[in-house]
Image: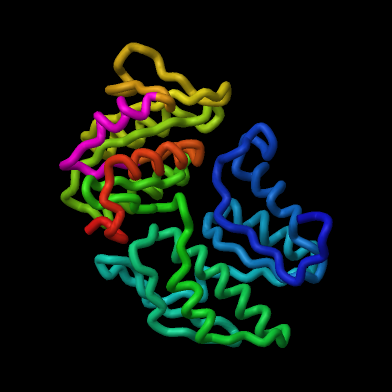
């Protein structure tokens, strides 16, 4: 980000992550992120926290950069039961009834950032095709984010790997599957506050938690006291994990992108992948 001269800078939601590099407070992390703001270059952000916005606004002021809050361009957002619909209204372009099917709620925020960037590019006289724009955002898929690998049994993957993203996952599960029961298959890196992540899951769901120990020095290994987890597997124990897949509950693989290849192997062995989503 610091070896190019951008026409627009974009700062997505800031949360606690990579503290050893970015800092131990949200203010320190924000100051590091604000480093991409360049003189006289507009910056778009999805952040709404007052502490974060105060720092971004100050940095934008110092750099004489226009700060655009993408959330202000979204209106009439509603949950449809199978996704989200909303209207986008920027300075130069307006699009009504954009529909994102079976996506996590934060996808709406990320889409708003992308559309706000397109809006700014339009102001800069770039040629923008609104039909292609709508088709792109409505058909976009992101592997590893609220992804359904199988309907029978129900198996999902989400790469939630810190407290911010695991909280979003919990909220999305409650939104889409109010009356469902869950089973979690998780692994967490040591520097991602693993005990807090496990507690977040346990405090929100009365569920079985299967902890998968990776062949990775960064991977957190829970104690054998039975407090944190119900079952432990290693990533090489494919057959053991397959045996623990529930036929009645929604099986959630989460905690790290490192689980994605394992999740794919499990769905190949156990799942019916002809369905595009869990209903």
Residue 171: x and y, percent? 33, 50
Find residue 82 and report its image quarter: bottom left
Toward the front, the furthest residue is 269
Residue 243 part of the magenta segment: yes
- Report the front residue among 67 and 144: 144
Relative side of 115 to 174, left or right: right
Toward the top, the furthest residue is 225
The structure residue drawn at horizontal position 68% and vertical position 79%, both measured from the top left corner, is: 121
- Report the front residue among 160 and 195: 160
Residue 2: x and y, percent? 80, 55
Q: Taking 197 as reference, is 231 above or below it?
A: above
The structure residue drawn at horizontal position 77% and vertical position 67%, both measured from the top left corner, is: 6
Q: How is the image coloured?
A: rainbow
Magenta stretch: give its range. Answer: 237-252
Residue 227: x and y, percent? 31, 18
Task: State the quadrant of the N terminus.
Answer: bottom right
């Amino acid at each position: 980000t610091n070896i190019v001269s951008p026409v627009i800078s974009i700062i997505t939601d800031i949360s606690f992550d990579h503290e050893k590099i970015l800092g131990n407070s949200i203010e320190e992390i924000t100051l590091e992120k604000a480093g991409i703001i360049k003189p006289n270059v507009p910056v778009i952000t999805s952040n709404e926290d007052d502490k974060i916005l105060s720092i971004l606004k100050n940095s934008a002021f110092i750099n004489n950069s226009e700060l655009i809050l993408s959330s202000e361009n979204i209106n009439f957002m509603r949950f449809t039961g199978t996704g989200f619909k909303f209207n986008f209204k920027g300075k130069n372009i307006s699009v009504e009834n954009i529909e994102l099917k079976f996506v996590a709620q934060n996808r709406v925020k990320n889409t708003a950032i992308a559309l706000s960037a397109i809006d700014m590019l339009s102001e800069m006289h770039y040629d923008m095709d609104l039909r292609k724009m709508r088709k792109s955002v409505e058909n976009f898929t992101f592997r590893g984010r609220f992804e359904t690998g199988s309907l029978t049994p129900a198996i999902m993957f989400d790469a939630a790997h810190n407290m911010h993203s695991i909280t979003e996952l919990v909220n999305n599960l409650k939104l889409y599957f109010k009356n469902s029961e869950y089973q979690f298959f998780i692994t967490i890196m040591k520097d991602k506050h693993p005990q807090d992540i496990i507690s977040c899951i346990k405090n929100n769901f009365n569920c079985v938690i299967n902890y998968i120990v990776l062949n990775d020095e960064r991977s957190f290994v829970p104690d054998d006291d039975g407090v944190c987890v119900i079952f432990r597997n290693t990533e090489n124990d494919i057959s053991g994990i397959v045996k623990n897949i529930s036929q009645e509950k929604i099986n959630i693989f989460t905690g790290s992108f490192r689980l994605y290849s394992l999740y794919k192997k499990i769905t190949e062995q156990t799942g019916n992948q002809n369905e595009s989503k869990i209903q």
